[in-house]
Amino acid sequence: MTSKTVLTKRLSRDALTTPHTGSVAKGRRNTLLRWGLYAILILFALFYLMPLFVMLTTSLKSLEEIRTGSLLALPRDITFAPWAEAWSTACAGTQCEGLRPFFWNSVLMAVPAVAISTVIGALNGYVFAQWRFPGANLFFAAILFGCFIPFQVVLLPMAQMLGLMGLAGTIPGLIFVHVIYGIGFTTLFFRNYYVTIPQELVRAAKVDGAGFFRIFWSIFLPISLPIITVSVIWQFTQIWNDFLFGVSFSGAGSQPVTVALNNIVNSTTGVKAYNVDMASAIIAALPTLLVYVVAGKYFIRGLTAGSVKG
Amino acid sequence: MPILQIDHLQKSYGDTQILHDINISIEEGDFLVLVGPSGCGKSTLLNCIAGLEPITGGAVRIAGRDVTGVSPKDRDIAMVFQSYALYPTMSVARNITFGMKVRGVDKVTQDRKLTEVARQLQIEPLLNRKPGQLSGGQRQRVAMGRALVRDPKLFLFDEPLSNLDAKLRVSMRTEIKKLHQDLNASIVYVTHDQIEAMTLATRIVVMKGGVIQQIGTPAEIYNRPANMFVADFMGSPAMNLIPARVRSEAGQTRIEIDRAGDAPLVITDPVSRDLPAQIVLGVRPEDIHEATGNAHLPGTAEGAGGEVMIDIVEPAGADTFAVTHLGGKPVTARLRAESAVRARAPFPLAFDLSKVSYFSPKDGVRLN
């Protein structure tokens, strides 16, 4: 075979087959890439879920099994006794009533604090976006600055302030602290949402005869569901999970669940009850998980919402 | 009694003065159009009339009542906005009745007026829809409906047609005109479109840089513009503004216009006028005719024209536009469609001197 015939042969074969095999190869490569991607994502998801898995399985094991078995093993005999103990009899310091009273403290603190800070944030945002006044930018900058003040900085002045107001060591005191701290964020959320709404809407309503609150109530509130969801999730997560304010500003009867969890885990007599600790931790985390599952879809939507079509 | 009277209105933002000494007065049933290029202050003036912007000086009276410090809701006005500004979560019906609801009008009256206006604007099938489900033209109608149910002393329109496509704009324009005639409503209407201004208005206010340039009927504004800005802004194609020299001889005014590559074109105005040596001659394209030799056009003076070189010919169906060069400026003539005009060839043109305007080249003010 001469070199020339080899060349022609190769050329003709390439010409005939290249497009076909090319696309197949490309398709195969895409599938491979896709599987690789999934594999990596699944790996990371597993890695991320590992602590939860350990917590969940440990909370369902007896102490005996924890001592003898492996950390990653599934429970042999599922027992809910640690959960019952965590909820109603575990000792936080000297008080042995479980998480239950503190859980309700957290509810009593978080629900009003979330509601109040969201309402105030909505009104603030409405004013900053649609009712500009001289110095509005300065005020807004000041409120934004409030978002970046570390908790530790305000501990002492806030303690003094709560004392002066007679709210030291009470749930209303904690509500007050969280509302103050949350306003910066909620104002920012609502202001950025409302600023996308054309000013002519307010003008039209003014000419129609509506006032400040009427316009807010009839026109702005009905279009605010996505951003209210964002504000509620954000605030609820922050306030429910807060430890520092809880431990600093609460009294004997007003400790939130995070503080109680710490006390339960730290006040052990004799053997460390890992299963009860894990159950307590999961109970303390459940509400935020629940809020996210229920409203998470709106959370993403609210954060990415651009403008409202009019 | 004027339905709207504005006296010495001033408006400033800080040190920047937006509106300078505005004086306007219109009667009931007038359709006043504020027209001017963007940034001329026309929308600000409308907002001042509405009470949405506080004014720095002067007074606004609506139907004889001084409303200078009165809030928008108590001025007995209704407004249609450029973006329509429909309430997005409310149905069309609730959008229209919102104002009445806020003012505590009883339900029976609300329903009656809603039905009335919906029929008038032909939006009955849309009453239960949300604004997001409507087309631009439909939204426009709803926005007008919201104003109409109020039955106010004064309607304010802020560029209501500028968001519509060209075809819809023309038909909505006709509808607004019809509505004005049917209701005999008093309207203040803002636009930057001079054709809209000409077709709709009973009176036009031409504005520039926060200063009123001229107030008058569409015919006055078109035929006797107060200055070169108005002359140039109103009319399409625009008025030709041709630099020229003036010589007065034996009770006649001779006007010389430079012609490219030829002796100056000399036209004679039979009326003796007191004009400065240098002027700008303003002549509408339709007032430049084909000179027909012996037969003089009505109102056309003898010798008011001559042969000029035609640069471009633009047939537009009903008319043919011929562009030439005079006094260093392109000059457009609106000729009959069947005119035998050719590009790059000389053509005889005559100026209708009864309709020309003379302007001072220094400050642009009208001289005749």
Image (tube, coloured by chain):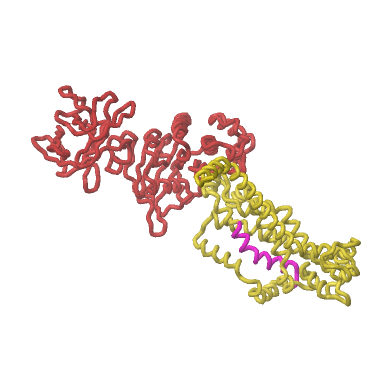
- The dominant secondary structure in magenta is helix
Q: Nearer the viewer, residue A168 or B312?
A: B312
In the orientation shown, which residue stands out farthest toward the top? B295
Q: Is residue A177 magenta?
A: yes
- Residue A207 visible, this angle: no
Q: Is residue B336 magenta?
A: no
Q: Is residue B367 above or below residue A191?
A: above
Q: Is residue A251 above or below residue B66?
A: below
Q: Is residue B121 visible?
A: yes
Quarter occupied by the C terminus of chain A: top right
Q: Position of residue A23 (x, y in %)?
A: 60, 44
Q: Residue at the left extreme?
A: B250
Closer to the camera in the image, B76 or B188: B188
**Position in image of residue A217 (x %, y %):** 63, 50
Residue located 71% across and 67% down the image: A242
Number of numbered labels in the structure image: 0
- Specify whether A191 is left or right of B20: right
Task: Pick the quarter of the image with the N terminus of chain A.
Answer: top right
Magenta region = A169-189
Q: Which of B76 and B228 lies nearest the eye of the viewer? A: B228
Residue A79 vertical position relative to residue B364 in the rendered view, above or below: below
Q: Nearer the viewer, residue B100 or A283?
A: A283
**Residue at horizontal 14 percent and vertical 35 percent from the top:** B266
In the rendered image of the structure, the colour used to display chain B is red
Q: Position of residue B68 (x, y in %)?
A: 45, 50
What shade does chain A have? Answer: yellow
